[in-house]
Image (cartoon, helix red, strand yellow):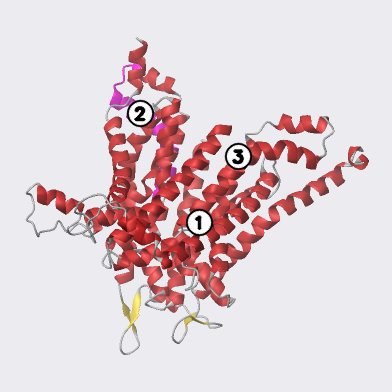
Amino acid sequence: MAKRAIDLHRIPGTRPAAIFFFIYLYLPMVILLALSFNANRAVTIWSGFSLEWYGRVLGNSAMLIATRNSLIIAAVAAVIATVVATLAALATANTRFRGKDAVDGLIALPLVVPEIVIAVALLLFFGALSVPLGFVTVTLAHTILCIPFAYLPIRARLEGMDARLIEAAGDLYASPVRAFRRVTLPLLWPGILSGAMLCFILSFDDFVLTLFVAGAGATTLPVYIYSLIRVGVTPEVNAVSSIMLVTSIVFVSLSFFLSKKQS
Amino acid sequence: MDAARDLPVSGARHRTRMRTRRALLLGPGVLLILAFLIAPLAIMAVVSFQAKGQNAGVDWGTFSLNAYIRFFFERDFDDSWIWNGDYLRIFFRSFLQSGITTLLSLAIGLPTALWISRLSPRDRNIALFLVTIPFWSNLLVRNYAWILMLRSGGLADSLFRSAGLLGPDDTLGLLYTDFSVSLGLTYSFLPFMVLPIYASLEKLDWRLVEAGYDLGANRWQVLKRIILPLSKPGIMAGAILVFVPCLGAFVTPTLLGGGKTLMIGNLIQNQFGAARDWPFGSALAFVLLMIVGLSMALFYARRRRAGEG
């Protein structure tokens, strides 16, 4: 009887659709990863396992410079965005004040405005102020993009926190600073770290903003990959792309397990 | 040491202190976004009303509606404006592509969200995680994977050739078509449909579904009369989350559409690259921003009304 009740909740046809969904989502990535190990230069004809392309890519100085640029920019943007977002979340969580909705809307704005519009606006802005395009402009652009991605989860975590813990710290004569350092921060830390990781990967992956505001000096890995793809499909592109893909997945998984473990 | 803190502080002083604290905490974030998003958007709006510079850039200090007129008209040889529907067609195509993508995403995303919502909590978390992974993966790389499959002599061709459905040198010609763009856009934004629908299904009271069955409804009726209406907020949110980024998409139409299938995103980028018409590019971006803003405003107005009703 009970089994039948559960069965009634199942909607027929959803399972095949879900299977199709996951195949659609993952098959291209799996194929890309598989082909990156293909020994054959004619990319889609399989002729054996090889690490040759990875070796070539890792020996390519242009690609190494682009990777270094990407890592530096992503690290700086993630740290700034996370710090700024954490401060803002501390101000808005669990309180109501006039203008709170406006502040929330403002901070969420980079999520809503199409990326290409942000890119164009920043290009014009830096142009009008004669700021030379390079590391600084890319990092600023990425920071703006990342702020809401750190802000929203950190604030959600703050609002899910038991306020009585902080009150208890106060009752036990902890100064507000001490209560923050010993109670709020340790509880919030996983959220902050997971937000920072998401920012890092967001910046590391970003292509559109970077294409507009990087100039010639701050080519990042995605921009470098783009220049390769435009020339054509080669085994080297497969290898770089696979490295990029695996990096993202590893980071997101870390961030996911970090936030799951603590909640 | 901190005796002053323990004394009862007057309400007004306490409030001032709270306000200062809040301003200091919010300051950096708000200032960053004002300086590097709001100000740039304002400049973009201004540029769209300037004349084009001699070679590139902007002829500052002029006021000109040329960028907006150019959307519908072009200069004839005798310097008069004549009708030009090219840009309108690109906008129309972008809307069409985004609409198709939204419908396809709904067709795949809704049943998937339903399926996920009936999983055990542990499996559900894993499934949701798998839905989010592509979002955090590089869009270029994900679209590039489709080039591998669709290009002539690519995986799809090889498959058809080895099945004998295609001659050894023939190609399905899938890449650089409207089809490949729809496929790539759906692939890129599909997860945005699943997550909000799932979020509203998670809150669904399944006793209502049981009640429906008790009252003699069949599965189709339950789906149509109970589940779908109750997951409508999620469907609406998902539709916006897919439609809006699609409209401004740049990577997919560039990589999978080749030069042929221009969408708004490519058109904008062109103005800052080859075409070198910054005011026109700004006007296009500004119009795109307005369309997005309007659809968000409509969505929130509807949701608010639905919430009150």
- Residue position for label 2: B225
- Residue position for label 1: A203
Q: Is residue B240 visible?
A: no
Q: Which residues are magenta?
A: B213-242
Residues at discs 2 and 3 both on one chain: no
Disc 3 residue crowd, few under 14, some 14–19, many 20+, Cα 10 Å: many
Q: Give the residue at the far bottom of this rendering.
A: B78
Q: Quadrant of residue A42?
A: bottom left
Query: Callout 2: residue from which chain?
Result: B
Disc 2 residue crowd, few under 14, some 14–19, many 20+, Cα 10 Å: some
How far apart marks 1 and 2 lie (CA) works out to 43 Å
Q: Is residue B226 magenta?
A: yes
Q: Secondary structure at mark 3?
A: helix
Q: Residue at x 31, y 61 (%)?
A: B255
Query: Callout 1: residue from which chain?
Result: A
Q: Earlier in the sequence, mark 1 or mark 3?
A: 3
**Front-most of residues A61 and A97:** A61
